[in-house]
Amino acid sequence: MSVDEAVIIDVVRTPSGRGKPGGALSGVHPVDLLGDLLAELVRRNDLDPGAVEDVIAGCVGQVGPQSVNIARNALLAAGFPEHVPGTTIDRQCGSSQQAAGFAAQAVMAGVQDVVIACGVESMSGVPIGTATLGRDPYGARLAARYPEGLVSQGVAAELIAQRHRLTRDELDEFSERSHRLAAEAAAAGEFDRELVPVQATDADGGHRVVDVDETVRPDTAMAALARLNPSFRTPELAERFPDLEWSITPGNSSPLTDGASAALIMSARRAEQLGLTPRARFHAFVVTGSDPLLMLTGVMPATARILKQTGLNLDDVDAYEVNEAFAPVPLAWLREFGADPARLNADGGAIALGHPLGASGTRLLGTLLARLEHTGGRYGLQTMCEGGGMANATIIERI
């Protein structure tokens, strides 16, 4: 049986809003945030929403306003016909990257022809930790397997910085770079095709249009970053990890973020029938598990595995998007593979553009695609570290 080719028709996203009360998107319900984006995705591609065979949404905080299958709620809010199904998945930070992988797999298997992969996160409305409701998410058997206890992602980032001998200055310099490149890309209009303005309500009940990334700070300077205190050091953790320098701060971490993103994925055959022009094809994708203590290192085995699977090396890849959950992650990845730093997150990364957890995967996909189109590159690699010790990696090929 022949394998259908899965192609990317379009990728869109909202601007990033600060994920706290008063943030630019904090007054927008996450169902509406994603729903309006889905409506715009089909509208601008002149696609009958009834032709969509599934909507797969990534969302990490599936509680409160993001509960009860936000994918289905958002597509109904978008006005899609009731026969269109939707499902919500959680692979932590890689949720919508995994949604894109599931969508492409369905197309390649010949099961579906038109699928939307998307994601949303309102970190102002559903703060980190809300989903556990103060209860233990691990249980006795997992605790017995890791008797010293698992740690937060911030502490994992500290451990990675220590293991790869990354200094505070290096972390802050990388963060300054992220803001500078994102600001330059925005000024050059490189995000214009993917950005969809959002009608938002402010604290006074007034309405305004949000059309720029609130999280990007063009004036970020090393001196200001150097004044920030470590975020994750406590007396108990300092005793457990006495050798850590405690260099992870709000400045070299991705900010709490509100946002949504979505990708229209089709079989090449159906795209041709509909008169739509594919922008890229899925070349390969993998997902791996890794050490749940050093949970952010999964990008290394995921990258190694996808390169082996495809027979490519990093010199063959024209752009890399390695999610900037914390600065040590892409920096350690660079050292591990000896990759070209100029090809890494060349339009800025999550430290500047934000990390709305469930939405980041398809956000990175859109940024990667735009970068390939801007430079004329052929292959792009996207990889994301994920809570619990996992990572997705995807290679796309520009058409």
Image: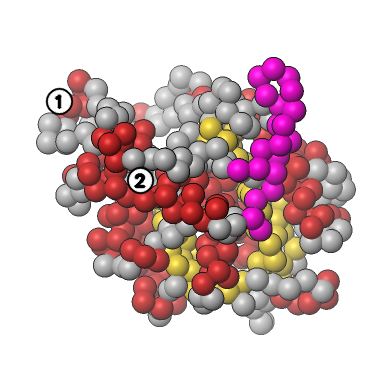
Residue drawn at x 57%, y 64% is: 370
In screen coordinates, is 67 left or right of 51?
A: left
Q: Determine whether 164 is above or below 305 in the image.
A: above
Q: Is residue 9 left or right of residue 92?
A: right
Q: Which residue appears at 47% of the width and 26% of the height? A: 129
Find residue 103 and report its image quarter. Answer: bottom right
Of helix, strand and loop, which one carries label 2? helix
**Residue 193 forms part of the magenta stretch:** yes
Report how far apart the C-alphas of labels 2 and 1 lie in the structure: 28 Å
Locate residue 399, reporting x and y percent. 62, 77
Look at the picture and state if 379 lies above or below 131.
below
**Figure quadrant of the N terminus:** bottom right
According to the picture, the residue beneath numbered tag 1 turns out to be 239
Identify the magenta region. 192-212
Residue sitting at 67 percent across and 76 percent down?
Answer: 4
Disc on res. 335: none
